[in-house]
Image (cartoon, grey):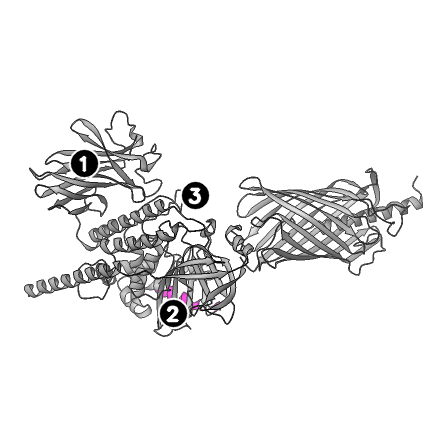
Amino acid sequence: MKMMGYRKKISLLIISSLLSVYASISFAREDIPVQDMHLEMKARDADVLFKKEKYDRSTFPVKLFHEGVRLKGRIEVKGSFTRNFDKKSLKIKLDKGQEWNGQRRIVLNAMATDASMMREWLAWDLIHTLGMAAPRVSYTRLHINRRFIGMFLHIEWIDPNMLARYGLGSDGEFFHPDDSTFCGDLTPKSVSNPERCWFKLSPRDNNFSPLKELISGLEEASIEDFDEFLEEHFDVDSVLNWILVNAITSNGDTYNKNYFIYYSTEIQKWVMIPWDYDLSFGRNWDEYLKYPANILNDNFQYFYPLELGLPNPLKDKLLKNPVLLERLKQKLKGLMGMPVEGYTGTPVWFTPTLMRNRIDTLTAMLVDDLHRERYTIASEQVMREQAVGLKDYVTFRYDFLRKTILETSDWVANRASVHVIKAGDSKSLVDGFGRTLGAVEAISLNGKADINVEVESMSVPVYTPKAINANSCIKRTWFLVNKTPYSNLKVNLSLQYIQENSKLSEIGKKVKKEKALQLWVLYYDQWKKLASTVSPVSNIIETRNFDIKAGRLYRFIACQS
Amino acid sequence: MITLKKFKKIRVLSCTFSTALLLFLISGASQAGGWLRSEGEHRYSAYLQSSSADKSWDRDGNDVNSSCTSKDNSITHEYEYGYSYYRTYFGKVSMASSKCGQDKSSGFGDVYLGVRGRLNLYKNGQAWEAIVIIPTGYDNTKSNRLGYGEPGLELGLYSSRRLNEKSTLTYGGSLRFWAGAPADQFRTKIGWTYKKNKTWSYHANLSGNFSLNNGKESLTPSIDGDFESEFDVIRGEIGLRRSLGKRLSLGAGLFKNLWGRNVSQRDGIFVSLSYVWGRL
């Protein structure tokens, strides 16, 4: 029996690995679809559209060229916070009787809040990979009066017709939280005055009783029986996938906003549809800063648990129900290319290799048009820094999820060990709480090596070089030792520090320019400055070709001269 | 010693002085003229004013006691519509009642129909304005008439400047031309608005109306050849406004004539209501 179980596990591991390899190869060669959209407007209107005051809601006449025909409609700026940017998100509404790819309403997101211009596309790619009912998304090069304006992200208009395409019918009850009131959290309070917290999108009536009934049921359902409640009332996969997407992308800007909920008369279940992922993949809202810095800042996080985001009974009870939690974990394992119990059919999507390939492909594609953008969001350098930060996020988040949710951890903080076997080995140093302390990449070595790293966190370095003020350092000291006798190696070493929000940050108060940080190592009794580079997005400082001698303790600090 | 003739003259003067101011108050009762609506946006406002005066300034700006206390009440309805990003159309009409001793008038005053356009393509608050004034069927032979009974045309320019995060200064002026007898006018306004928070704002305005002294003949009833359409007045106003959500706001305030010529020394209160709908 034991042998049978063992063989089964090996088979599953092989299948998962093959799927992962196949997926990584196939994506790297895959073209990311990009479309061109040509608009014609009066020159004055085209100019005013991007330069007028942000609160103005005027629309302007526009013509859209499509398959040799000029489709007429009106164009306006869309969004609320994004109106602050020069590059505006747009909405086109075509006149009655005219459609573009089956739609009268066309949304073009400027991606102005995301210098990488990738976060939303990546999130939607994950959502589609999971098979969720979701809008079609594609990069779109926008031209107005034959002039290239910029790269936008077209997101299909969400309406019952879109849902019908997924076999959910178009005559259901369709609701969306009001993003400006932050109270659409599926609690009874949210429906005490439903018009305050919710929009009823269809049918166009004021009947909130289906939603009230659902929320009443959610409130009464016990945690123990929540799996049964969910099976009876929801498309369970849509709920699990929604939470998974938020967990993988670290999207906490939801659960009281930024989603749709639809009761399908076809399947007679409620379906979740996610929304708005521009501030995901490591971005972090800062409650201690005033608007707009609370949204747009340099904070970086990857270590929030599955429960991240505001309370919501659907999420909270699901995560406490053992059956549903186990099902969620198996799906997560599948997405992460790890062996699963039984074949769930979850495609592999979230591995560091796959994601790095995606990000590199997207970077190459987006950089081409970046210099032609009429209203630039960010320079190429900033964009590439964001792309590097994204790749780091993926690695860190993968390790965090694996360590804290899917595997057994020793729950020891600020300490990590790796075993380096050969040149080319690249290992992350992850502590018992899933936090990445750093990484080593072996360049050369004369034998296997056990590398240990410990950190003193959230405190200014006790020892610094003479000329350096401790407050101009990162509030972290790293201690590294190679415990294997007679083992010497040369590595590329990267060390990570925390900048979670303005109160929880290891950046010293006198550090004015993060990129000017340099790594120092205490070498016998001498401080030595190391040639180093900083990735400010993911808070990593790196040095190359560093020699590690067996048994020697190395103390590292990062300071600005 | 006040003779009967003099008494009648004073009473008529009191009433006609109040007419001048009534016209001024009604036509000025609205928001600054520099603001355009978003395309597709509608705004309705109502201003209820009540004022009284028992003194006047004569042609030379001297104090004159009135034989009666003139009391004026009016409600002005105004509607604005953002026809396009570049044009806002608006109209207003007042219902007023004016009483001074035994003399009473009530009914609709003039109708104002106007258009506003942008002087700055990208920034709101800088605009030109053109208004047509259309008399309605009130009796313009009464001493406390509700209007001159003549059509008019007003052309204005307005601007606003943000002083800091919470304060805005608005200023502007217009020329009002009348057909027939009434003297043409130069009108001006300067105002300061302080936005305390999302709910409350306060304002203080100074507005002026200055006659161009080109009245062709005396309006009836004639008073020793006085051209009572030739009047000057500077009015001060303070008020506050409370927003009740995105659409509705309520206001209240006080106003007072601070200086004048050929016009009553009036002070009063107002309350207002404003409702916006359409593109929000």
- Residue type at mark 3 is Lys
For marks 1 and 2, give the CA distance. 55 Å
- Please name which of the two marks, 3 or 2, marks the residue nearer to the observer: 2
* Numbered badge on residue B125: none
Is residue A40 found left or right of B263 in the rendered image?
Answer: left
Point 54% across, 48% down: residue: B199
Residue identified by numbered label 3: A290
Up-down: is A377 above or below A18? above
CB atoms at circles 3 and 2 under 8 Å apart? no
* Numbered badge on residue A479: 1
Q: Is residue A207 magenta?
A: yes
Instruction: Where is residue A252? Give x, y as percent.
Output: 34, 53
Q: Residues within 10 Å of mark 3 (few under 14, many from 20)?
A: few
Identify the mark nearer the N-term, 1 or 3. Answer: 3
Q: Chain of mark 2?
A: A
Identify the mark nearer the N-term, 3 or 2. Answer: 2
The quadrant the N terminus of chain A occupies is: bottom left
CB atoms at circles 1 and 2 under 8 Å apart? no
Residue identified by numbered label 2: A163
User: From which residue to which does the magenta span run?
Assistant: A203-217
SS of the residue at dot 2? helix
- Residue type at mark 2 is Leu
For marks 3 and 2, give the CA distance. 38 Å
Instruction: Where is residue A262? Give x, y as percent.
Output: 39, 67
Front in this rendered view, residue B194 or B35: B35
- Residue type at mark 1 is Phe
Q: Is residue A451 magenta?
A: no
SS of the residue at dot 1? strand
